Image: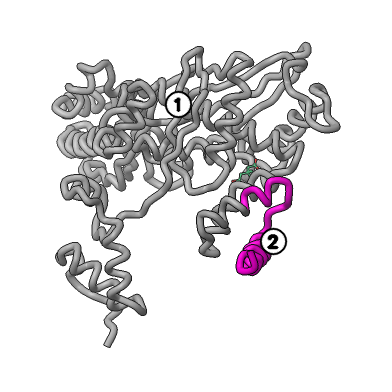
């Protein structure tokens, strides 16, 4: 009898968990156990580290680890590590990197590095009264949090600005303490959250003990204390530019025609949110792959990027294109809060290798590398879209996936790649080719 629910699952050993799952949810338990166990790391110590990143682990989920070489950013060459499951992403980025390498490469600069957190609380009293006490409250919050902030301060970071925000006009009795932080080379999530929780306690304690408040004002209800993943002031710009005459024409389009089509494609992503979403998704194809490869939090980066894309009330392209005095300019502004110390960055064995491959960058350098990769991906996607269309390159890259799905042998894969060099790839066309190839082979 299959049991689809269980209590105490987390207390089982890893093998017991695996067995319980496969016995209750799979048709062929023994084979599934064997298959999932085949993805366990051979080195027990490495496996222990991986298991430590999550809970209830029963195996490892593999993704390809690729590299985009020939990336010139601010005059420095990089090979960029990328983790992605999507065919053609790494190829597209590599192609764009090579294209721009001979045109001055990518440039990038940090605009700001400030992060944000909030204590959300309710209080039955007037804003004015709380505001009048706020300097003393701030002093208490800062001094109570010293054990948490001292280390970060010694590295040049810490709490920057603390502000009381009145939100009671939108929700009765609701206020915020909005705090800005500098977290140096760490992403700083744990630091920020610890400080905010401490600030919440100090606020409650101050108000409870202060003689400035009457009895019914003495209770602060902290709803939550948490960083904000929207960090519009942790901002980086990446750009490329060259004379229009240095852009390669393509087919019927000369350099000027191509530049103008490119500009229009970006413009469309500024005025239509359906296109903007896909356009930005392409940017994140590049960004997420580097964020993942370096052990950073891609959900945070994505969430922030999309909010930023809608910062004027309408969702728009994150990249921009301008043609001015015969010069083609293409750039991206994006908040990217990442770290190169702390979190998974040094714990994950491959993330550590990624950072080494990138020359052990500071968080600011990593922001620039990530932004340049996003811009490269966007450039490659748009260049394909406005010339050949995306499917040609995409399906060629997808060919091997289709062949693997159809259990093609090494020889069949080689033959199919040669066959489809100048032909449209589709699932049916590949299946027909394999059928033909397998029948023909019998007669050779
Ligand atoms: C596919 O993953 C990404 C693209 O759709 C991006 C774009 O359309 O700009 C090619």
The residue singled out by tag 2 in the image is: 429
Image-quadrant location for residue 354: top left
Q: Nearer the viewer, mark 2 or mark 1?
A: 2
State the mark number for residue 33.
Answer: none
Residue 233, x across and y down, in percent: 46, 25
**Residue reaching furthest right?**
252
Residue 394 is a magenta residue = no
- Looking at the image, tell me whether mark 2 or mark 1 is earlier in sequence order: 1
Residue 167, x across and y down, in percent: 43, 39
Q: Quadrant of the N terminus?
A: bottom left
Residue 46, x across and y down, in percent: 21, 45
What residue sits 81% from the left and 22% below the top? 256
Q: Is residue 115 visible?
A: yes
Give the residues in magenta: 416-444
Q: Is residue 203 visible?
A: no
Element under disc 2: helix
> CA separation, marks 2 and 1?
35 Å
């Amino acid at each position: 009898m299959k049991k689809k629910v269980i209590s105490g699952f987390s207390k089982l050993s890893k093998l017991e968990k695996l067995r319980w799952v496969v016995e209750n949810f799979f048709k062929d338990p023994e084979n599934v156990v064997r298959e999932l166990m085949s993805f366990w790391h051979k080195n027990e110590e490495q496996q222990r580290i991986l298991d430590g990143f999550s809970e209830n682990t029963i195996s490892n989920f593999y993704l390809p680890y690729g590299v985009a070489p020939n990336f010139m950013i601010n005059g420095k060459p990089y090979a960029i590590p990328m983790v992605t499951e999507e065919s053609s992403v790494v190829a597209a980025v590599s192609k764009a990197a090579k294209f721009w390498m001979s045109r001055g490469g990518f440039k990038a600069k940090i605009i700001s590095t400030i992060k944000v957190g909030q204590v959300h609380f309710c209080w039955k009293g007037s804003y004015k009264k709380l505001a009048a006490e706020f300097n003393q409250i701030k002093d208490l919050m800062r001094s109570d949090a010293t054990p948490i902030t001292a280390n970060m301060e010694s590295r040049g970071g810490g709490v920057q600005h603390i502000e009381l925000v009145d939100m009671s006009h939108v929700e009765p009795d609701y206020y915020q303490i909005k705090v800005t932080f500098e977290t140096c080379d760490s992403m700083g999530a744990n630091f920020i959250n610890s400080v905010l929780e401490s600030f919440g306690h100090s606020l409650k304690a101050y108000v409870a003990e202060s003689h400035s408040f009457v009895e019914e004002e003495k209770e602060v209800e902290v709803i939550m204390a948490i960083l904000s993943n929207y960090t519009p002031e942790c901002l980086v710009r990446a750009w490329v530019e060259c004379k229009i005459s240095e852009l390669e024409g393509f087919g019927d389009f000369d350099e000027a025609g191509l530049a103008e089509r490119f500009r229009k494609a970006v413009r469309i992503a500024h005025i239509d949110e359906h296109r903007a979403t896909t356009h930005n998704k392409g940017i994140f194809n590049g960004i997420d792959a580097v964020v993942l490869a370096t052990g950073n939090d891609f959900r945070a980066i994505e969430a922030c990027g999309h909010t930023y894309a809608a910062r004027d009330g309408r969702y728009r392209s994150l990249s921009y294109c301008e043609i001015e005095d015969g010069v083609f300019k293409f750039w991206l502004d994006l908040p990217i809060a990442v770290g190169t110390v702390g979190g998974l960055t040094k714990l994950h064995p491959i993330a550590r290798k990624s950072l080494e491959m990138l020359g052990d960058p500071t968080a600011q350098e990593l922001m620039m590398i990530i932004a340049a990769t996003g811009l490269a991906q966007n450039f490659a996607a748009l260049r394909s879209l406005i010339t050949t269309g995306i499917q040609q390159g995409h399906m060629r890259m997808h060919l091997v996936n289709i062949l693997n799905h159809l259990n093609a042998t090494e020889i069949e894969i080689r033959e199919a790649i040669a066959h489809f060099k100048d032909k449209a790839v589709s699932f049916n066309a590949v299946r027909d080719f394999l059928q033909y190839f397998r029948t023909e082979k019998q007669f050779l």
